[in-house]
Amino acid sequence: QVQLVESGGGLVQAGGSLGLSCTASVASGSNFSVNEMGWYRQVPGKQRDLVATITRNEVPTYGGPAQGRFTISRDNAKNTVFLQMLGLKYEDTGVYLCNARDIYGIQSFWGRGTQVTVSS
């Protein structure tokens, strides 16, 4: 029904920067309307953590570690969300998963994730 495709992960040294992007493709005939989009980080053995989300009205919310270093933005016409990450730290390492949900938060879809590795 909805497919999310992430790109932009990779290996970077501590202090470096990376940009991620994620595009939501909604199947023809689907009644799903993309509202909030965002990024979450998954590390093996730990819970999935909020990185940042942004509403269709472009109101952002950041998790604690992302504040002041990451910037989330979106292109509504393309159902695409971006994450600019500056000043990366070793602890930012993980699989970054894209999420899209409807205005009620009832329907929620996840991408397969993109690996971000920060070397110390």
Image (spheres, rainbow, N blue to C red):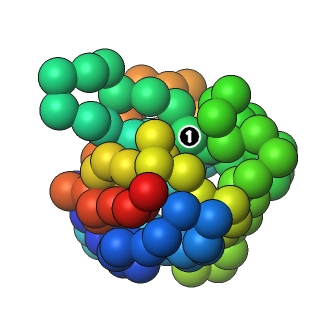
Which type of secondary structure does the marked residue at label 1 adopt?
strand
**72 to 79, vertically: above or below:** above
Is 97 on the left or on the right of 64, as rendered?
left
**72 to 23, vertically: above or below:** above
Residue shown at 31% from the left, 20% from the top: 47
Residue 102, visible in the rendered structure? no
Is 97 on the left or on the right of 58, as rendered?
left
**13 to 60, vertically: above or below:** below
Q: Quickly name the residue at label 1.
A: 51
Looking at the image, how many numbered discs can be counted on the residues? Answer: 1
Residue 91, visible in the rendered structure? yes
Q: Residue 120: give x, y in percent of width and height.
A: 44, 57
Kind of residue at disc 1: Val
**Outermost front residue:** 120
Q: In which quarter of the image is residue 72?
A: bottom right
Q: Nearer the viewer, residue 113 or 37?
A: 113
Q: In which quarter of the image is residue 103?
A: top right
Residue shown at 44% from the left, 73% from the top: 12
Is 11 on the left or on the right of 67, as rendered?
left
Quadrant placement of the N terminus: bottom left
Residue shown at 34% from the left, 74% from the top: 10
Residue shown at 68% from the left, 28% from the top: 64
Q: Residue 55: give x, y in percent of width and height.
A: 70, 45
Q: Residue 66: give x, y in percent of width and height.
A: 67, 42
Q: Nearer the viewer, residue 9 or 106?
A: 9
